[in-house]
Image: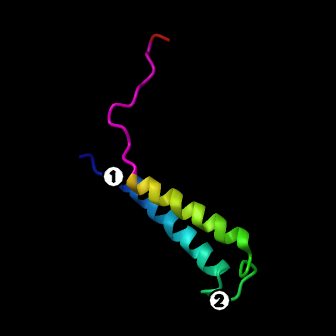
Amino acid sequence: MKELSPLRRTIGLVLVMIGGFWAAISLGFLEESFMTGQRIYTVLGAIVALAGGLVLVIKPRSGAATPDEGE
């Protein structure tokens, strides 16, 4: 089983944290902000957090195709 690279793990975690932060602000769990009460930031936060989760869960293919050198 191939382990995630540190860069991929960092990107995934940062996306999850940013998405969660946006959703928490827009839902009113954190201080008042221009984002508070705005549904779009809840949706965007959920999408960004989900994307980060997918980066962490989905493993890269080990035998990725590379273009031929002659072409």
Q: Viewed as shown, does residue 37 lie left or right of 70?
A: right
Cα–Cα span, label 2 and label 1: 35 Å
Q: What residue lies at 41% left-to-right and 53% top-to-bottom?
A: 8
Instruction: For residue 69, say whether it is visible.
Output: yes
Element at label 1:
loop
Q: Amino acid at mark 2?
A: Glu
- Is residue 66 shown above or below 47? above
Q: What residue lies at 45% left-to-right and 53% top-to-bottom?
A: 55
Which residue is denoted by mark 1 in the rendering?
Answer: 4
Instruction: For residue 7, say whether it is visible.
Output: no
- Is residue 4 shown above or below 61? below
Image mark for residue 31 = 2
Q: Is residue 35 one of those drawn in magenta?
A: no
- Is residue 63 shown above or below 7? above
Residue 19 in the image, given as x and y percentages of width and height: 57, 68
Magenta extent: 58-69
**Quadrant of residue 69 within the rendered picture:** top left
Residue 30 in the image, given as x and y percentages of width and height: 61, 87
